[in-house]
Amino acid sequence: MAKNMKDNDTNGTELPNYLIEEIEDVVKEKKLTKDEKDKLIEEIKKRFMKIRFEPGEAIGIISAQSISEPATQMTMRTYHFAGSAGIKVTYGLPRLIEIFDAKRKPDTPVVTIYLKKQYNNLETAKKIADSIREKNVEDLSRSITLNLNENSIEIEPIDLRKLGTIEKVLKDVSKTKSGLKGLKIKKKTKEISVAPKEEVDVKELQKIREKILQTQVEGIKSVSNALVRRSGDDWVINTIGSNLEEVLKIKEVDEARTFTNDLHETKKVLGVEAARNLIIEESLQTLQQQGLDVDIRHIMLVSDIMTMAGDVRSIGRYGVAGAKSSILARAAFEETIKHLVRASIRGEVDKFNGIFENVMIGQVIPSGTGMFDLIAKFEDVGESASGEKAD
């Protein structure tokens, strides 16, 4: 490896190890000659030098400008990715704001489910899509009526084969769920009777009915809909509503490719590195949908800043901007009085290490040629041996 780096180092340009490894792989795969390999290395060096940033360059400001300027061209609409199914997914500027604000719950949470090779067919995809869709008692019932004579609630399922399932779920819920504890549940020929142990008025009976309606019987919680679509050689399931942890437990699901658009859920289930990758992918996809071309390195810098603390932080007053060490930089962003008063009470000191605070007071910024001080040492100029003064 060291030999390769030394061989590839000409004109003061040293390529990183990962690039050298990739070059070697390409040379072997394409069976390039020595001259072709040298030309490839030379071209890569030119491009590598072109894309590097100079020491002292304000890459944070450049990244902010490079993302924000194209974002002014973005639309404020949503679109239907499922056509006639009428499923709306947020995109455009609202989605970009969701990502960089690290919104706790996106407006339209979606899980994109890929299947393992042996299960990658339409029949299996439809079966899984139907099984993961959350179904409450309301969805499985033809009618749910109040029987005032017996002070009970009568549930008539659409499919009589579901009688036992609904009964079992209601019995389990009556042991734990607040407001439904202590119910007497009885399965009849075509319906289920649910009655409180003590006699209650109509209003209270109505409240119990509403809670029963929303009781989950089948599927995965929070997944309100699931659609199957073809994507290349894959049958993909898109869900409305997100519960990645439960989805990944399904044996037919390909865990390596399945993902959600919810940043915080991704961080919780898969870790902060997965959340970082999701920020990059979702941001690029959102921009590209609008025909906007932003260098991926700008997005990568933002995603690194958002996740460097081990959690997903927003770019805002309660996230990255609010965590700056400089008092004046925080005050210049938002909530000026709050930051200044708090700093004065705590006796905080501003070191003026950043750009914003130095601009505010008119000092040279610590960037570019302002990064360093120039020190010159002048020796005394004496007379030459001939007695003439030196110039």
Image (spheres, helix red, strand yellow):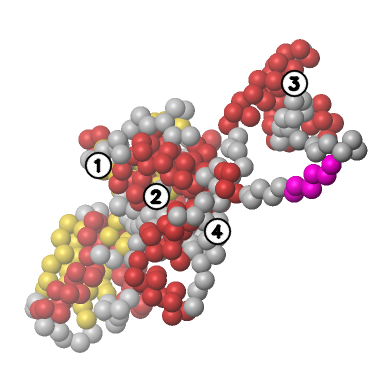
Query: Which residue type carries mark 3?
Result: Lys
Query: Which residue type carries mark 1?
Result: Met
* Mark 2, residue position: 99
Which residue is the extreme one toward the right? Answer: 385
Q: Residues within 10 Å of mark 2 (few under 14, many from 20)?
A: many
3D distance between C-alphas at marks 3 and 1: 49 Å
Residue 51: within the magenta? no
3D distance between C-alphas at marks 2 and 1: 15 Å
* Mark 4, residue position: 353
Q: Secondary structure at mark 1?
A: loop
Foreground: disc 4 or disc 3: 4
* Mark 3, residue position: 28
* Mark 1, residue position: 76
In the rendered image, residue 79, in percent from the top left (x then y), is placed at: 26, 38
In the rendered image, residue 99, in percent from the top left (x then y), is placed at: 39, 50
Q: Residue at x 58, y 31 (%)?
A: 51
3D distance between C-alphas at marks 3 and 2: 41 Å
Q: Secondary structure at mark 3?
A: helix
Q: Residues within 10 Å of mark 3 (few under 14, many from 20)?
A: few
What main secondary structure does the magenta stretch of the protein show? loop
Query: Which residue type carries mark 4?
Result: Asn
Q: Which residues are magenta?
A: 377-383
In depth, the one of 120 and 22 nearer the eye is: 22
Q: Quadrant of the C terminus?
A: top right
